[in-house]
Structure formats: C-alpha cells, structure tokens
Amino acid sequence: MDSTSPRSPQGRLSLQTIAMPADTNWNGDIFGGWLLSQMDLAGSVCARHRALGRVATVAIESMAFLTPVKVGDVISCYSYVVRSGRSSMLIAIEVWETSNQQQLPRILTEGRFTYVAIDEQGHPRALPEETQLPAEA
C-alpha cells in the first residue's frame, strides 16, 4: 500500500498520542514495538466496546509498517470490527500521522488483531448480541 494514496482513515478514532524521543530505535525512528503496543491499545478500545467488557489479545493476524514514524508525529489509531464470532473479534487497526494540519493525514501502519471477550476469571465468554450494543455516539 502506497502511504501517499488518497484514502482516508477507516473506523473510529480509538487512540491518539505523540511519538517521543524515548520511543526511538537505533536509527532514530520510532521503535516498531512501541507502535505495535499503541495499536494493541487502540484495538482493545474497539474490542471492549463490542464486547461490553473485558477482552484479551490472542493473535496478530497481520501487521504492515508502511512508513517510518518520526519523533513528534501525532499518531491517530482508527479501528473497526471486521468480523466477530461467539467470543472472538477480528479488529482492523490503521495508524495515521495527523500532526500537520496543512497536509492530508498519511497512513503509517495497519494490522488485524484478534481479541476474545473474557469474564472476570479470564475465561472466554460469549459476545453480546449486536442488538444489545449501545448506539454509536
């Protein structure tokens, strides 16, 4: 995927933060593990909304680093449910750089993470029916 394509973010804004110097690798770019953890947090926000409660990350189906993230970049993570099963959800997560108000946002990273709804003991539980979900704000 070309990071300069005219596409726009898909899903809801789930997390926004600023890449800081402490998050860099030996090249001075933001460390991929830091970005992965931000994506996991954003996906968890989406999954918790769908599950109406606790979730656990169980898999990363795909992950693509499209453009390096630089110190000072404002990253905005967008997410949406691709599909859900009895207790699991596949969540698509896109990370966009949105700090320059003079330019269109550019996609940096995208991935698909699987989460499972869990109960208070950490065991899988059934997702609520779609009709039980609160209306989107």
Image: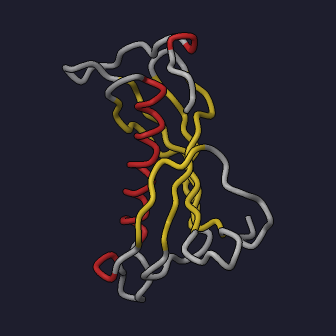
Q: Position of residue 53 (x, y in %)?
A: 34, 24
Q: Position of residue 96 (x, y in %)?
A: 58, 64
Question: Does 97 sit left or right of 49 as displayed?
Answer: right
Snapshot quadrant of residue 67: bottom right
- Residue at 37% x, 57% y is 37
- Residue at 38% x, 38% y is 57
Question: In which quadrant of the rendered image does the C terminus lie?
Answer: top right
Residue lying farthest to the right in this orientation = 6
Taking 31 as reference, is 71 above or below it?
below
Taking 7 as reference, is 26 above or below it?
below
Taking 71 as reference, is 118 above or below it?
above
- Residue at 45% x, 53% y is 15
- Residue at 41% x, 64% y is 17
Snapshot quadrant of residue 131: top right
Question: Does 98 sit left or right of 72 as displayed?
Answer: right
Residue lying farthest to the left in this orientation = 121
Please give the count of numbered marks on the rendered protein. Answer: 0
Residue lying farthest to the bottom in this orientation = 27
Q: How is the image coloured?
A: secondary structure
Question: Does 79 sit left or right of 104 as displayed?
Answer: left
Q: Position of residue 54 (x, y in %)?
A: 32, 28
Question: In which quadrant of the rendered image does the N terminus lie?
Answer: bottom right
Q: Position of residue 64 (x, y in %)?
A: 58, 61
Taking 17 as reference, is 122 above or below it?
above
